[in-house]
Amino acid sequence: MAAVNPLSNPKGVKLSCELCHSPAYIQCPDCKVTYYCDVDHQQADWTSIHEKICQLLIPVRTAVLFLTSAEERVHSAEQLLQRKKHLIDLTTKEAHRLLYEGRHVDVIPAATHALSFSIDVHGLTSVELVPVYLILAEANIGLGNLTQAEEYLTHAYWTVLKSVDCSNLTRSKLHRNLGLLYSAKGEFEESLRHLSNDIYFASTVSGPADISTAGGYFHMANVFFRQNKMDIADSLYSEITDIWYTHLNRLVDVQIRSSMRSGPVWFDDRDQEGLDENQEAEALQILSAIYDMREQAAKKEPAEIAKVLHALAMLHYLRLDFKLARELGRKLLQLIQQLPKDDKSDSMMLFIESTERKMSAKMSAKQNPFP
């Protein structure tokens, strides 16, 4: 982190903290356009997002020199708008990534920046603010700050209610967060109602068996698990695994067949129809949790464990983490031997063989970097 730079404010200039809007006494010595009330908030912002956007803030927060022509002013305004939109995109993606990693404390500064720039660009009543409200709400739920989370969700709810062009995916995410809030409060029936709405709205976009519905099913299963309704929870965990398994298997199948046709494997290529960062993070969170639950169950079901293990291995394969994919593949191989032979075991064997080939080729490339 950059060193502390105490302020000596010019008379009459009031500066506020980037995170809490209290009077600021510290300036970032690198960008010199960001201010904090104390060292703790400076450190929190740096750890979360400021290191990544420090230099990007300078042209956004520095006064523009006098422009003589209307054309110059229009160009300058458009440039400023594009820079702010880039910052919205960058800070929102980073907040999402931190959220899926469970780093709820670090989410807050990144999402706070995203909200601030979104308000500046789109206005206070725009539906564009809703995704950021939802990130802030989920982070606060994770931290146990339910009152603060409810406040963000209230803003999101009324914004959606008054909007005429809100997408069903946004409505889905709103109900998912409301479901999480009520689950955290122990109000399970209300939680299930909102999670049902989440699945409904997601289904209208992509169908009930799409990965966009899997998160709603997952949180619903967790609610039933907390209510000790294990049969329902188990059925939902199986449904979630099937959804992700089918999706990942299709993507991996495309890559395996493509590599078999085209010969040499290029390790920096990703399938054009692959997963984005948020989908990867969500899949990792959900499938890891289901795998741990299956492994710790008193009565183990090898077929269910094998399927979720295969899904996890395929996920790491698509993330180009072939080492971990191979480790999981070898665990999978041991499980396959306990299962009756069928089409799924053939698919698993094809995947394991492909992963071994990828690792062998990768190790060979490291040992012989020059053809």
Image (tube, helix red, strand yellow):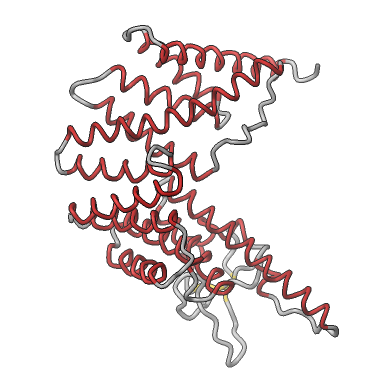
Residue at the (75%, 20%) spot, across then down: 369
User: In screen coordinates, is 289 left or right of 265?
Assistant: left
* Nearer to the camera, 310 or 112: 310
- Residue 44 percent across, percent down from the top left: 47, 60
Residue at the (28%, 50%) spot, across then down: 196
- Count of residue discs: 0
Q: Is residue 102 above or below residue 253?
A: below
Residue at the (60%, 82%) spot, across then down: 8
- Residue 352 percent across, percent down from the top left: 50, 14
* Nearer to the camera, 294 or 196: 196
- Give the residue at the far right of this rendering: 69
* Nearer to the camera, 185 or 48: 185
User: In screen coordinates, is 92 left or right of 181?
Assistant: right
User: In screen coordinates, is 145 left or right of 40?
Assistant: left
- Residue 150 percent across, percent down from the top left: 30, 66
- Residue 331 percent across, percent down from the top left: 40, 16
Residue at the (32%, 32%) spot, across then down: 239
Q: Is residue 311 above or below residue 262?
A: below
Which quarter of the rendering shows the N terminus? bottom right
Q: Is residue 173 above or below residue 218?
A: below
Which quarter of the rendering shows the C terminus? top right
User: In screen coordinates, is 209 left or right of 184?
Assistant: right
